[in-house]
Image (cartoon, rainbow, N blue to C red):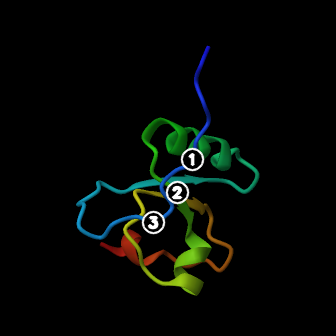
Amino acid sequence: GTCKWQPPAYDVPDDIDFWKTMVVGYPSGDKRLTFVQMEALTGWPAKDEWDFKHLGMSNHPFIKANYPHHEGKLMEMERR
């Protein structure tokens, strides 16, 4: 075909009210494959839970996390 790969829009606007999708699984459970497909289908990027600690909160619609958490802690959004 004539399809051309394009990366997702890495700058996620704050003015869009996304439903958040958390991709959670055991370490080495192919979560990355799932969110790469989600990025390809929607054009919006995924974010790893580690990034929130180091880069702060953002409006990313897809979040990848491990279960059980390596420190045994819940993410802030899991407490709601």
The Cα atoms of the two marked residues, 1 and 3, are separated by 17 Å
Q: Secondary structure at mark 1?
A: helix
Check if mark 2's residue and mark 1's residue have beta carbons within 8 Å: yes
Write down the quadrant of residue 3 in the picture.
top right
Q: Amino acid at mark 1?
A: Phe
Q: Is residue 56 left or right of residue 78?
A: right
Name the residue beneath numbered marker 1. 35
Foreground pick, 66 / 4? 4
- Residue extending farthest right: 28
Give how far across and how far down residue 4 sits, in percent: 60, 31
Say which amino acid is labelled 2.
Ala
List the residue tagged with mark 3: 11
Q: Which residue is rendered at x = 33% and y = 66% of the image?
A: 13
Outermost residue toward the front in this view: 2
Report the disc number at residue 46: 2
User: Does dot 3 land on a helix, a strand or a loop?
Assistant: loop
SS label for mark 2: strand
Please state which amino acid type lies under the numbered disc 3.
Asp
Q: Are there few (<14), some (14-19), or many (20+) residues within 10 Å of tag 1?
A: many
Left or right of residue 73, residue 42 in this image: left
Split into 4 quadrants, where in the image is the C terminus? bottom left
Query: Residue 54 at x, y = what percent?
Result: 59, 85
